[in-house]
Amino acid sequence: MNEVNRELILTNVSRRYGNVVAVQDVSFSVAHGEIVAVLGPSGSGKTTVLNMVGGQLQPSSGDIRIGGKSIAGLPPEKIDAATVFQDYALFPHLNVLDNVGFGPRMRSVSRSEAAKKAMECLSLVGLSEYGDRKVTQLSGGQRQRVATARALAVEPAILLMDEPLGALDRQIRLRLQDELSALLRRLEVTTLLVTHDQTEAFAMADRIAVMHNGRLEQIGSPDELYSWPRTEFVSTFLGGGTILEARAAQRSSHGSVRAETVIGSFNCRVNCDVPEGASLRVLVRPEHVSLQPAGTSEVSDLKNGQVANVLNNGEATRTTVRFGDVTIESLQLGWRQMAQGDAIDALIKRDGPVVIVKEG
Ligand code: ADP
Ligand code: MG
């Protein structure tokens, strides 16, 4: 790919439909060659963001820049971006090669140049033998590869993908997540990927932008979002866990605070100063909770729980435990002998749980 600036910057972008605010004051950037996933539940505004970058929709306010230049008011064909849609939107009357060569042809490249570029892109996605096929004779996974090759063939500054793997079976989806992200990294394609699937965002993206009700809740690397979720929404949308109300037993020190909850006390991570007595919200992830039969150990943080549910798959044991009104989940490696109704104590990993921002 040639040396141009392929950075994408959104600044205070909003989009309204009458009274509905589909996207509200969203700002983030995608660096040259970076893969950013926009992750959120259905209706959170993901597609609206993508379509504003692609020029299919105009923002109500705010600015979008590609390679330093504002795209305000430009129609899609004047924007240096290509989109892969969930339904692939391939041309059924054209064969695979002509589908992929379509973009270059539209950009007034000669027929033979376009075919050469199309072949190159088909081989990138492992379909060099399929040029003559009708697209109607391809599997879902193959159609997705053709759609990706077609988008790459115009060498867009920005690649936009809207739930690109959403229609595929689990197995092929997992394989394409690996293959696609490796290809995009190798080609240094600046990519904005929309998905509602947490595992897909984790598998493919350098950074994840979490959206909720039209707003950007948090953006960061998968590790940052999982370890330091800022809001309740981010903490439960990415991974499981229980949020508990707590009180700081003493002033925090060295990023750690002792949290007193109604079911027991334990140490949590915190990234700001917390005074003694402050009210807190703490997130306890299942992998931070290990269980033991009640009364068998001196060291336990939560006592006299009752097993409500056990899921064993050989690899790990996932247990739901009740301490009074509070339900906690535990995830432990291997097969743990436990049954519904068992009395248990729990040990919370020291500085495993994290203090999250109190909302409202
Ligand atoms: P997502 O892709 O995250 O599922 P969308 O961006 O498609 O969400 O939609 C965000 C919000 O905007 C939703 O509440 C949706 O109902 C609303 N919306 C989207 N398109 C329109 C439209 N053309 N007219 C009115 N409301 C719309
Ligand atoms: Mg959508």
Image: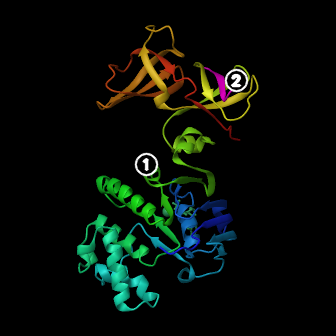
Which residue appears at 73% of the width and 29% of the height? 274
Which residue appears at 37% of the width and 85% of the height? 114
Lower sequence index among marks 2 and 1? 1
Q: Is residue 113 magenta?
A: no
Image location of residue 117, percent across then percent down:
37, 80
Looking at the image, residue 169 lies above or below residue 296: below
Say what secondary structure mark 2 lies in.
strand
Work out how far the residue at label 2 is from the one at label 1, CA to CA, in angstroms.
33 Å
Location of residue 65 by image quarter: bottom right
Q: Is residue 14 left or right of residue 306?
A: right
Image location of residue 289, percent across then percent down:
48, 25
Which residue appears at 70% of the width and 25% of the height? 253
Image location of residue 152, percent across then percent down:
42, 73
Image location of residue 102, percent across then percent down:
39, 84
Using a 10 Å C-alpha cutoff, classify the residue at mark 1 as few (fewer than 14 neighbours), some (14 to 19) or many (20 or more).
few
Q: How is the image coloured?
A: rainbow
Looking at the image, residue 139 lies above or below residue 319: below
Q: Nearer the viewer, residue 49 or 1?
A: 1
Q: Which residue is mark 1?
A: 199
**Disc 2 marks which amino acid?**
Ala
Q: Which residue is mark 2?
A: 248
Please give the range of residues in magenta: 253-262
Helix, strand or loop: magenta stretch: strand
Asked if the residue at label 2 sits under 8 Å from ligand 1, the reply is: no
Using a 10 Å C-alpha cutoff, classify the residue at mark 2 as few (fewer than 14 neighbours), some (14 to 19) or many (20 or more).
many
Q: Nearer the viewer, residue 241 or 152?
A: 152
Quadrant of ligand 1 in image: bottom right
Q: Is residue 213 left or right of residue 149?
A: right
**Disc 1 marks which amino acid?**
Thr
Q: Is residue 254 left or right of residue 141?
A: right
